[in-house]
Amino acid sequence: MRVRPVPGLSVSVDAHGRLDVVTAPPVRHVRCGPVGTAVWLALRQHDGDVEGAARMLAALWGTEPANARADLDIWVDELRVAGLVRAEL
């Protein structure tokens, strides 16, 4: 599965490692902590490939890839429900 940002997002990371995602009207704003920021960056580095991002994060964080994937799936679903990303099969 690939995950793509919806058109019109404004994305930035502040000095504290927090990701800010803002949609075009109707405006929705989501702020993520450093872990959410790392997940977003991993997804972007892997062109939205959730499996690839999960493998990379698992290696960086010393955890099982299946656990990282399960956590990523939950996080991605929350972003999808918030209208910030769309899934492509």
Image: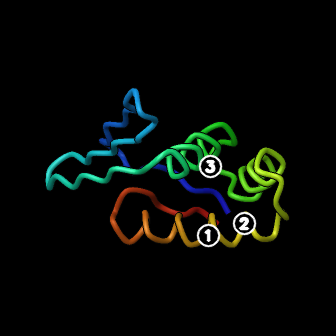
Where does the image place residue 13, in percent across and percent down from the top left? 41, 32
Work out how far the residue at label 2 is from the one at label 1, CA to CA, in angstroms: 6 Å
Q: Which of the numbered marks, if any, corresponds to residue 82?
A: none
Label of residue 73 in the image: 1
Give above or below for 60 relative to 28. Answer: above
Tag 2: amino acid: Arg
Q: How far apart are marks 3 and 2 (CA)?
A: 13 Å
Marks 2 and 1 in Cβ contact (< 8 Å): yes
Q: Name the residue under label 2.
A: 69
Per the image, the residue denoted by label 3 is: 48
Along the line of sight, the residue nearer the viewer: 29 or 47: 29
Per the image, label 2 sits on a secondary structure element best described as helix
Amino acid type at circle 3 is: Gly
Q: Which is more toward the observer, 44 or 67?
A: 67
Of the two numbered discs 1 and 3 on the same chain, state the one appearing first in sequence: 3
Q: Residue at x 53, y 64 (%)?
A: 76
Disc 1 element: helix
